[in-house]
């Protein structure tokens, strides 16, 4: 009962944050909307029995990414954007989004049982997760670390003034 | 009443749709970037919901990898946006027309 109330409250919060992100014309408010959406999504991850991943999400997005984006926006003094895109592109995009939502909703009505069942006690613990990460998924884990190092070097190269 | 996979799927669809609209109809490079992040995270929610439904940890693992990749993407994306603004003096993505014909 409680979890359902939390779920719907947090889902609304995340969706409101997402709408702020997408539609607000001031970039600072949009980034704050992203932070709200990410906190909501983090709570949803916790409700889906993977609590530490929700914490990761909040730290990475509502913490690091939000701060770096606010820093960039304020340091460069960004203003609002120019004129909106053309009507045809807008209409097609809204139609695609509506089609996607309607299709997933139809799938949900047809093929999905209503409620989550109970989970076994080891599910979602950081022990089970870490065990999988260093045994069966060790290679993707290492590749992800290589990717992060590459991204770091790339970000430094791109930020150097004389190289761009 | 508690909640189920259907609720998670519908929420995912709405978040992904909002991100799609933001990525394709907005002209600020920052907003487009944020919308892509929103789409990535709505897919994470889908992976976690399905993993919870099937009782397998693989959903959480893939969400973890998506999170790592999107962190890398955020670092490089912000660097690209900064370089772009320095060069063009605007965040309007219409100014990125060098490779357009």
Image: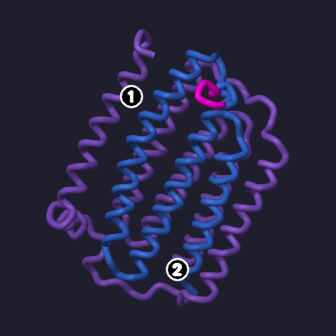
Chain colours: A purple, B blue
Distance (Cα) linking label 2 and label 1:
38 Å
- Residue at image x 50%, y 56%? B41
- Residue at image x 42%, y 66%? A46
In this view, the residue farthest toward the top is: A162
Q: Position of residue A48 (x, y in %)?
A: 44, 72
Q: Magenta span has A116?
A: no
Tell me the crowding category of disc 1: few under 14, some 14 to 19, or many 20 or more residues within 10 angstroms, Cα based: many
Q: Position of residue B10 (x, y in %)?
A: 62, 72
Q: Secondary structure at mark 2?
A: helix
- Front in this rendered view, residue B29 or A64: B29
> Which chain is disc 2 placed on?
B
Residue range of the region highlighted in magenta in the rendering = B96-101
Q: Position of residue B7 (x, y in %)?
A: 59, 77
Q: Which residue is mark 1?
A: A155
Q: Position of residue B35 (x, y in %)?
A: 60, 47
The quarter of the displayed image where residue A7 is located: bottom right
By secondary structure, the bulk of the magenta-drawn segment is best described as loop
Q: Which residue is mark 2?
A: B5
In this view, the residue farthest toward the left is: A135
To the question of a shared chain for discs 2 and 1, the answer is no
Residue B47 placement, left or right of A97:
left
């Amino acid at each position: 009962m409680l979890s359902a109330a939390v779920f719907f409250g947090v889902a609304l919060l995340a969706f409101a944050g997402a709408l702020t992100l997408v539609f607000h014309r001031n970039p600072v408010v949009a980034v704050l909307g992203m932070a709200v959406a990410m906190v909501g999504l983090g709570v949803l991850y916790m409700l889906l029995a993977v609590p530490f991943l929700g914490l990761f999400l909040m730290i990475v997005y509502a913490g690091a990414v939000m701060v770096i984006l606010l820093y960039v926006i304020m340091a460069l003094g960004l203003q609002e954007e120019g004129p909106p895109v053309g009507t045809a592109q807008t209409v097609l995009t809204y139609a695609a989004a509506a089609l996607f939502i309607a299709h997933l909703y139809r799938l949900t009505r047809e093929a999905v049982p209503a409620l989550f069942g109970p989970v076994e006690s080891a599910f979602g613990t950081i022990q089970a997760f870490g065990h999988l990460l260093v045994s069966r998924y060790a290679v993707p884990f290492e590749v992800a670390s290589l990717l992060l190092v590459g991204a770091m070097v790339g970000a430094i190269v791109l930020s150097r003034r004389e190289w761009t | 009443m508690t909640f189920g996979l259907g609720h998670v799927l519908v929420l995912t669809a709405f978040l992904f749709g909002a991100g799609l609209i933001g990525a394709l109809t907005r002209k600020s490079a920052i907003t487009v970037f944020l919308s892509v992040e929103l789409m990535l995270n709505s897919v994470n929610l889908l992976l976690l919901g399905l993993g919870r439904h099937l009782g397998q940890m693989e959903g959480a693992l893939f969400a973890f990898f998506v999170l790592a990749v999107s962190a890398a993407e955020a670092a490089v994306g912000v660097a690209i946006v900064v370089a772009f603004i320095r060069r063009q003096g605007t965040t309007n993505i219409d100014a990125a027309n060098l490779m357009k014909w």
